[in-house]
Image (tube, rainbow, N blue to C red):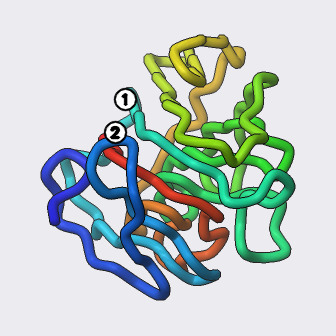
């Protein structure tokens, strides 16, 4: 099916479908798993809004690996990434370089939470279930030399998200 603004996705690793917030969600079921979107020019942005519904499968781990975060929508190194730390904080990152983090958290496994990040110049807001938080000035200059993925880091499908992702846009 088409995901992320009409760009076709390819499933990698162990991805299944689970009950979602709206119809079915992508269930990221193992390390090295995600949905590859290639490197579409319409997503190579410096200013954007990313939003999706997520459900954690663990209250203490956001990924299937030893890493301390799981990637929700994420480019390869140098691009942008939206992810979740093990402790439940959301972040926007320049992958492999730096990040801006929320203090609000998602730590339960009870159901789906709406998450979003908006970036306009150096102004970054992170939203959890409609409640926004400014995370300070952040404008690292993203580069798009690799691919974009849902549920993992683009390129190598590292830091696969331990949970379900629905309606990414």
Please give the name of the residue rendered at 66% of the width and 43% of the height, measured from the top-left corner. Answer: 110
Numbered disc 2: secondary structure? loop
- In the image as oriented, which residue stretches furthest toward the bottom? 13
**Dot label at residue 128:** none
Query: Which one is nearer the viewer's eye here, 31 or 140?
Result: 31
User: Is 147 in front, or is 121?
Assistant: 147
Disc 1: which residue: 48
Contact (Cβ within 8 Å) of mark 2 with mark 1: yes
Decide if residue 145 is in sight here: no
Up/down of 14 relative to 128, above or below: below
Query: Which quarter of the figure has residue 108?
Result: top right
Secondary structure found at label 1: strand
Which residue occupies 44% across, 78% down?
A: 15
Q: Kindly report which numbered mark, 2 or 1, lies closer to the viewer in this rendering.
A: 1
Instruction: Where is residue 151? Give x, y as percent.
Output: 50, 63
- What's the distance in space between the residues labelled 2 and 1, CA to CA? 6 Å
**Mark 1 crowd level (few <14, some 14–19, many ≥20, 10 Å Cα):** some
Position of residue 127 measured from the top left corner of the image (x, y, whole percent)? 56, 21
Measured along the vertical axis of the image, is residue 96 above or below residue 35?
above
Question: Which numbered marker is on residue 45?
Answer: 2
Q: Quadrant of the C terminus?
A: top left
> Is 74 placed left or right of 43 in the picture?
right
Residue toward you, 144 or 156? 156
């Amino acid at each position: 099916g088409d995901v992320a603004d009409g760009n076709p996705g390819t499933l990698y690793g162990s991805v299944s479908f689970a009950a979602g917030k709206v119809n079915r969600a992508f269930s990221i079921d193992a390390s090295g798993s995600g949905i590859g979107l290639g490197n579409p020019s319409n997503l190579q942005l410096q200013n954007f809004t990313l939003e999706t519904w997520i459900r954690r499968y663990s209250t203490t781990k956001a990924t299937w690996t030893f890493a301390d975060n799981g990637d929700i929508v994420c480019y390869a190194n140098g691009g942008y990434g939206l992810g979740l730390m093990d402790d439940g904080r959301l972040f926007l990152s320049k992958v492999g370089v730096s990040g801006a983090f929320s203090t609000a958290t998602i730590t339960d496994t009870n159901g789906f939470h709406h998450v979003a990040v908006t970036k306009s110049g150096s102004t970054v807001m992170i939203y959890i279930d409609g409640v926004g938080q400014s995370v300070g000035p952040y404008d690292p200059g993203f580069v798009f030399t690799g691919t974009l993925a849902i549920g993992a880091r683009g390129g190598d499908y590292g830091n696969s998200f331990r949970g379900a992702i629905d309606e990414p846009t």
